[in-house]
C-alpha cells in the first residue's frame, strides 16, 4: 500500500494468467517470510518494500493442487519519499499502483476482492 493505492500485478503465468492480483510467490529454502515478501515484491514489481504484519491467509485450489497464501501488509521502503516507479518483471505481465476505489473494476484473480474486503483493505 502507498496511501490510498494498492500495488497490483497482472499475472503473466498460471494460475490466474491475465488477471490482476497482488505480488507474491514461493518462500525459498532458508528464507524468512519477510525476506520472501520483499524478494517476491521486488522481483515482480521493482518496488522495494518494508514488510508489516500478517493480514490473513487464503486457501487457493487449482485443479489437484492446493496453496496456502499468507498475505502481509507492506509499504514502499523509505516512507516520506516518492515510491519507486513499478516495472513488470519476473512473471508479471503488467504492474501498477491502483487507487483503492478502482481495484474492483479490474479483472481480479478469484477470491481476491472478497479477501481484500474481509481484511479491511477495500
Image: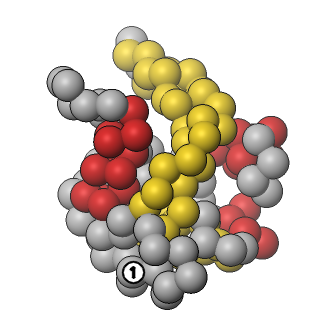
In the image, 19 versus 91, the foreground residue is 91
In what quadrant of the picture does the N terminus appear?
A: bottom right
Q: How many marks?
A: 1
Query: In percent of the image, x 43 and y 52: which residue is there?
Result: 23
**Is the residue 89 above or below the residue 64 in the image?**
below
In the image, 120 versus 110, the foreground residue is 120
Extreme residue toward the left, this view: 29
Q: Quadrant of residue 27?
A: top left
Query: In percent of the image, x 18 and y 24: which residue is there?
Result: 29
**Is the residue 120 above or below the residue 111 in the image?**
below
- Say if residue 48 shows up in the picture: yes
Report x, y in % for residue 50. 46, 57
Report x, y in % for residue 108. 59, 54
Report x, y in % for residue 90. 22, 57
- Say if residue 105 shows up in the picture: no
Q: Is residue 28 left or right of residue 74?
A: left
Query: In percent of the image, x 37 and y 69: which residue is there?
Result: 47
Q: Which residue is mark 1?
A: 84
Extreme residue toward the bottom, this view: 82
Report x, y in % for residue 10. 43, 62
Query: In percent of the image, x 52 and y 31: which residue is there?
Result: 70
Extreme residue toward the top, this view: 64
Q: Secondary structure at mark 1?
A: loop
In what quadrant of the picture does the C terminus appear?
A: bottom right
In the image, 116 versus 77, the foreground residue is 77
Q: Is residue 15 left or right of residue 111?
A: left
**Is the residue 60 above or below the residue 37 in the image?**
above
In the image, 16 versus 121, the foreground residue is 121
Q: Quadrant of residue 44?
A: bottom left
Q: Quadrant of residue 103?
A: bottom right
Amino acid at each position: 500500500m502507498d496511501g490510498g493505492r494498492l500495488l497490483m500485478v497482472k499475472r503473466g503465468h498460471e494460475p490466474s494468467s491475465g488477471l490482476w492480483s497482488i505480488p507474491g510467490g514461493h518462500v525459498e529454502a532458508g528464507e524468512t517470510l519477510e525476506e520472501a515478501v520483499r524478494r517476491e515484491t521486488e522481483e515482480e514489481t521493482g518496488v522495494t518494500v518494508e514488510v508489516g504484519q500478517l493480514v490473513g491467509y487464503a486457501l487457493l485450489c487449482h485443479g489437484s493442487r492446493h496453496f496456502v497464501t499468507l498475505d502481509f501488509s507492506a509499504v514502499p521502503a523509505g516512507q516520506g519519499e516518492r515510491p519507486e516507479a513499478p516495472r513488470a518483471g519476473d512473471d508479471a505481465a503488467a504492474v501498477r499502483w491502483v487507487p483503492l476505489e478502482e481495484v474492483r473494476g479490474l479483472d481480479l484473480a478469484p477470491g481476491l476482492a472478497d479477501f481484500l474486503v474481509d481484511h479491511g483493505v477495500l
